[in-house]
Each structure stands twice: as C-alpha cells, then as structure tokens.
Amino acid sequence: MNPIIAANWKMNMNINEGLSLVNNILDSSPSKKSQVIFFPPFITLNAISDRLKNTRYEVGVQNIHHEQSGAFTGEISAQMIKSLDVQYAIIGHSERRQFFHETDYQINKKIHNALSANLFPILCIGETLEERESGETSKVLKKQLSSALKDVDSDVKGLIVAYEPVWAIGTGITANSNQVNEAHGFINETTSQLLENPVPILYGGSANADNAAELFQIKNVDGFLIGGASLKSESFCQIIKNIT
Ligand code: 13P
C-alpha cells in the first residue's frame, strides 16, 4: 500500500495562500508513490479541488455536520459536500471534540452520513495526557473506535483511522516509537475484530520532516495526518520525500 499523507490545514490559508501552497507542491512534485490528500477550510475547497483536477492529489473536508440538512445555521453536511469534487472527510478530530464538544454519538452519525454520501471518513482518535498517565490509553482508544463505528457495515470500504494523541498535537512533542507501535498495534487489532477489510492507520501529532521516516518504519503506520508541517511546501514535500 502506498503511504497516505494527509494535510490538515485547520483554520489557516485563504484562497490565494492555499492555491499558492498547492502550486508550489505541484511544482516540486515530491513523489509519485504516495497518496496525498489536502484538507483545506470549507471556503477554499472549490478552488483547491478545481486546481487539483486531473492531478494525482485528492481533497477532503475537515468536518461535516451530523445531520443531512435542516435548521443548523452555519453548518455543512456530507450530502452538500458531495456536489463538490471531494472524496474524504476528517471526523472526530480532537480539536472538534475538545473545543466544539463533539460527542461519540455525533461522531458515529457523522461516520454514517459520510459513508452514505460516498465520502471516505478519516476517523481521528487519541488519548489526552491525563488519560495516558493514568494508564487508560487502550481503554479510551477502544471506546472511541467502537462508538464511532457502531452499526457500520463490517464490510465497509475506504475507512481510515488517524491516531492522534491529544498531547502531541501542535506541541512539538511527538509520540515515541514505542508509544506509536503500541497504539497502532492496538488499533489494528481492534479494527480487525470489528471490520473485515484492512483499515489504514495514520499517525498525527507534531509529525515533521525530521521524525516521519523513523515513525513510518513502525508496523501499522500507513501514513500521516499532518497539521503545522503541512502549511509550508518545503516541510510538507520533505516529509513526502523522506518516506517514499
Ligand atoms: P500538528 O501536526 O500541527 O501537530 O497537528 C496534527 C493534527 O492535528 C492533524 O490533524
């Protein structure tokens, strides 16, 4: 399987900045072997997906609402996204759980909605520092997985999981090889019990050009979900080059 490298721009990049970033990445053409997916903010989706048409790069959304339509001011549903040329949806990012109080129930509904709109979900899971320090990492990961995947067909295709320890996101502190090995192994074991098809598992949390190659050697690490280091073409292309 080719590595999956997903760029979560979060609330960064206006249209011109986003276009300039993808143009630079296209120009430096970092690798033909990786599957690269950009997650720009909603307002730039159209411009970025138009620019990436007929290239090997793909596009996704950072969030969807858990209902399909209705009186939810300011929200956007999977069904609305599908009218654009977009293939993926990040679901359950820890920033959404933490700052927007997303619940396991809503995350499960989002997974179902994404799948029914033919968007491939990237389900984000991960423990807080407090949970890790009290020895609850596996318990938390298992609960997040089983509640998010409740009533999902066991032969679902295209689902991706991202392991993003909350304490490693945006902090410059990356999970060490043992921690990544253990968490990815556990996620792999749990998803194989729940689902029939293999589920790629991405690592996210201060991944950068210096640590990506080493982390990518670890079993069950199938790629990365990158925040900060995806906002500059040099660092993003360097990650791609270092692992392919
Ligand atoms: P950083 O790479 O900035 O730590 O962010 C990771 C992340 O949250 C990707 O979704």
Image (cartoon, grey):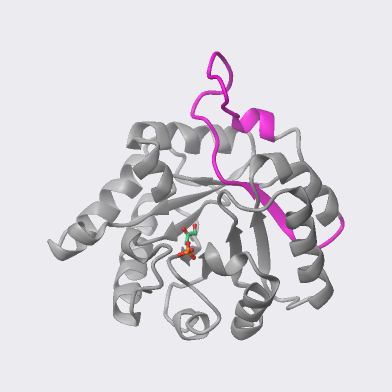
Q: Position of residue 136 (x, y in %)?
A: 17, 58
Tell me: 222 left or right of 28. left
Tell me if residue 78 comes above or below residue 97 in the rendering.
Answer: above
Q: Position of residue 146 (x, y in %)?
A: 32, 45
Q: How many marks?
A: 0
Q: Which residues are magenta?
A: 54-81
Residue 216 visible somewhere in the drawing: yes
Q: Position of residue 171 (x, y in %)?
A: 38, 67
Tell me: 232 left or right of 190. right
Tell me: 208 left or right of 195. right
The image quarter in which residue 241 lies: bottom right
Going 38% across and 41% down the picture, which residue do you hit?
99
Q: Main secondary structure of the magenta part?
A: loop
Residue 149 visible somewhere in the drawing: no
Q: Is residue 98 magenta?
A: no
Q: Residue furthest left?
A: 134
Tell me: 83 left or right of 106. right
Going 63% across and 34% down the picture, which residue do you hit?
117
Quarter of the rendering occupied by the N terminus: bottom right
Q: Position of residue 212 (x, y in %)?
A: 51, 80
Of 200 and 20, nearer the camera is 20
Tell me if residue 83 comes above or below residue 148 in the rendering.
Answer: above
Of 239 and 41, nearer the camera is 41
Q: Residue furthest right?
A: 54
Of 184 and 235, nearer the camera is 235
Tell me if residue 69 comes above or below residue 174 in the rendering.
Answer: above
Q: Residue furthest top?
A: 71
Quarter of the rendering occupied by the C terminus: bottom right
Tell me if residue 236 comes above or below residue 54 in the rendering.
Answer: below
Going 36% across and 73% down the picture, which residue do you hit?
173
Going 79% across and 56% down the picture, which residue do you hit?
19
